[in-house]
Image (cartoon, grey):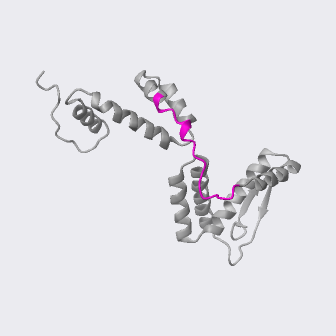
């Protein structure tokens, strides 16, 4: 268990628990770092972002902090069960989860079909800001939404009149503060 060092207080439920630092336990700063790592790993898993999950896991394995992060993930899960279920139901839920746990747990659940890039493009074209925000918020992993959007843009690029692409990219560079590039305006002679 990760304890708060040197008799510091940690709020647990309605009461306050005071602990003493043990020789082999983590200092408070390391506990906070481990919490951040646990949260990063959990968010990547929850949102089906395999790349982020693998990167976070590789970092943990490199730095040999698996035990601390595993402890924090177990604590997060226990808190979630405690808040969601009555005490007598929580253990039954955990036992049921343990029975149906997959044999291979190296991957995360990815919902690629949940990203509707076509609707996003239509909403952007129509200027429907609320719908764009709603689509982005409703997509568990926006990586696939962005990928679909990029695919749609790539399909539209050949349809642009000559010179339009250079004009659009020059405008984007101006808007987003990148170093100015001397690209002639497509309509300069018109």
Magenta includes 93?
Answer: no
Q: Please tell me which residue is depicted at 48% across the width and 38% down the height of the picture.
A: 145
Q: Please tell me which residue is depicted at 22% across the width and 35% down the height of the picture.
A: 166
- Asked where in the image residue 168 lies, by quadrant, the reply is top left
Tell me where the magenta segment starts and ends, as one range: 102-118
Residue 185: image location, x then y, percent: 17, 30
Task: Locate the N terminus by quadrant.
Answer: bottom right
Tell me: 21 left or right of 54.
right
Magenta includes 105?
Answer: yes
Image mark count: 0
Q: Please tell me which residue is depicted at 40% across the width and 24% down the height of the picture.
A: 125
Q: Nearer the viewer, residue 162 or 6?
A: 162
Residue 71: image location, x then y, percent: 69, 64
Residue 73 in the image: above or below residue 161 = below
Residue 151: image location, x then y, percent: 39, 37
- Main SS of the magenta part reads loop
Q: Residue furthest bottom?
A: 23
Tell me: 107 left or right of 15.
left
Q: Residue furthest right?
A: 88
Q: Nearer the viewer, residue 51 or 74?
A: 51
- Asked where in the image residue 11 lies, by quadrant, the reply is bottom right
Residue 50: image location, x then y, percent: 53, 52
Q: Please tell me which residue is depicted at 53% across the width and 31% down the height of the picture.
A: 135
Task: Locate the C terminus by quadrant.
Answer: top left
């Amino acid at each position: 268990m990760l304890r708060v060092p040197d008799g510091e207080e940690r709020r647990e439920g309605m009461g306050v628990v005071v602990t003493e630092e043990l020789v082999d336990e983590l200092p408070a700063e390391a506990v906070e770092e481990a919490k951040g790592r646990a949260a990063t790993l959990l968010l990547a898993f929850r949102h089906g972002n395999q790349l982020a999950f693998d990167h976070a896991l590789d970092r943990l394995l490199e730095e040999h902090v698996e035990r601390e992060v595993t402890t924090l993930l177990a604590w997060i899960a226990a808190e979630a069960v405690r808040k969601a279920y009555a005490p007598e139901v929580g253990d039954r839920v955990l036992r049921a989860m343990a029975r149906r746990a997959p044999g291979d747990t190296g991957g995360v659940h990815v919902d690629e079909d949940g990203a509707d890039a076509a609707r996003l493009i239509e909403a952007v074209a129509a200027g429907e800001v609320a719908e764009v925000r709603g689509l982005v918020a409703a997509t568990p992993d926006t990586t696939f939404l962005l990928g679909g959007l990029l695919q749609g843009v790539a399909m539209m690029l050949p349809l642009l009149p000559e010179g339009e692409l250079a004009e659009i990219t020059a405008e984007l560079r101006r808007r987003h503060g990148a170093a100015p590039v001397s690209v002639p305006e497509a309509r300069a002679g018109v």
